[in-house]
Image (spheres, rainbow, N blue to C red):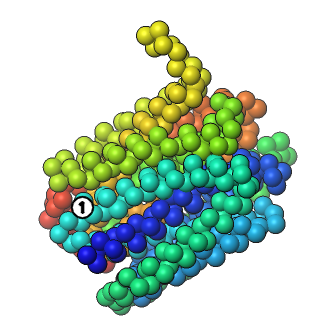
Amino acid sequence: MTKYLVFTVTSLSFLLVAISGTTVSVAFPIITSSFNASLILAGWVLSVNQLAATAIMPLAGKAGDIFGGKLTFLISIAVFTIGSLLGAIAPNIEFLIAARFIQGIGLGSFLPLGTAIVSDQFPQARQQAIGLFTSIMPIGMIIGPNIGGWLVAAFGWRSVFWLNIPLGIIVFIASFFLLKPGVKEKGQLDLAGAGLFTGSLSALLIALSDIGSNPQRSSWLLPGVLFAVAIVLMLIFIQREGKIESPIIDLQLLKKRPFLAANLFNLLYGASVLGIMSFIPLYATSIYGMSTLESGLILTPRSVGTMAASIVTSISLPKWGYRWPMLTGTGIMVLSLFLLGMNLTGINVLGIHLSGTMILLTIMFISGVGMGVTAPAANNACIELMPNRIATITGVRGMFRQSGSAISIAVTSLILQNFSDMNYGFTVVFFGLATILVISAPLVFAMPKAAGALYPSEKSGSQAT
């Protein structure tokens, strides 16, 4: 009975991730206008959260192994709650961006730590347990946009941050009493490596923001310097990771085909699927003329599709394997991105007129089904590469996925800011992301086909630490 209570508590943390992300996305247009901020600057409210999560995920996984999952999990919940409080009282856009960074540090820790905790509770049914655990997120994606739209309309955008505080306190108290300390292992946290990686990604995102903020610039010196800094820091990061004993990313593992393919797939998946979803409420209000409340409701079919498809896929993974669900789900998501790029405001089918709202609802459902089919298979395929280090491998996977998402948000903000016709800007974004997702499909064939499907040489390499 205890393990099911633990599953419930850790699942609540995933609900927080989904509710927090979707409510802020719904509030994003109002936040932008409230502070009279440019889309480029306001975009940092979204991307800085991804940036923080990217930096913390691999560290959180290792911290869970070293200090124990319970302590690390409790700290992450406390940090998230404090970040939410700061966001609720933010006096300006810059303060809000800083608060979102703090909030992201907490949120980024939930995925690797929660996955490891659930896996420990269900060792004989790991695939199904992790698949069902990740399928909890769509429930939050249903609750978040709907309650977020209502809260913003009734009480203003700050209410979406106040909502997180009691929820965070409840999860903290339940985790404190239910979770066990767990086994601790020797090791060190590569804080310097995390700083180098974060600095490189930050320099890249700031350079993109600067280009978007000053399109008619007379000098490209600043963005040029920032791009150079990003490259130099990344080279130093790579050099360091190859020398130290406890790196964030074991470069020897990345040289192996399955690891490299899995992380490249997650990078492109994050860029094509996760980042753009933050802009769907803006897309609904600007292209389809929907209200804030309606733009929140428009995300519900996506969540329903994700939840239904992920439950079916999770249960069927032992029979289906990993590759075909990933390929099928990727194809469905490509279709949804192309349909979004067409900006269909109304069509007639068999004499029946479908409004733009109905079309968008249908596309969101299709997108959700694609995500629900892909995610459980992709998550377990990555874990299959290092089953004895679930928190670590989940953290690395999340780092690549969130990096893609953060870059996607920055590039999307840049494109939309520099197109006078936002309709056309969104078309460019959706078609471009669909193309990127198509390019990622062949990587699936280099990833594990099913549980225990690695070649002996690859399996022995995946056990390295």
Q: Amino acid at mark 1?
A: Gln
Camera-side residue of 130 and 168: 168
Q: Secondary structure at mark 1?
A: helix
User: Looking at this rendering, what residue extends furthest in the front direction?
Assistant: 154
66 shown above or below 157? below
Camera-side residue of 120 and 392: 120
51 shown above or below 75? above
The spot of residue 149 in percent (x, y) is: 64, 48
Residue matched to label 1:
127
Q: In the figure, is residue 301 to the left or right of 379?
A: right
Residue under the point 33% across and 74% down: 5
Q: Is residue 83 at all visible to an observer of this figure? A: yes
Camera-side residue of 455 and 108: 108
Q: Is the C terminus in the top left, top right, bottom left or bottom right quadrant?
A: bottom left
State the image quarter where residue 113 is shown: bottom left
Question: Badge 1 local density, few (<14 within 10 Å), some, or many (20+)?
Answer: many
Q: In the figure, is residue 271 to the left or right of 259?
A: right
The spot of residue 140 in percent (x, y) is: 48, 56
Residue under the point 25% across and 75% down: 1
Residue under the point 37% across and 69% down: 8
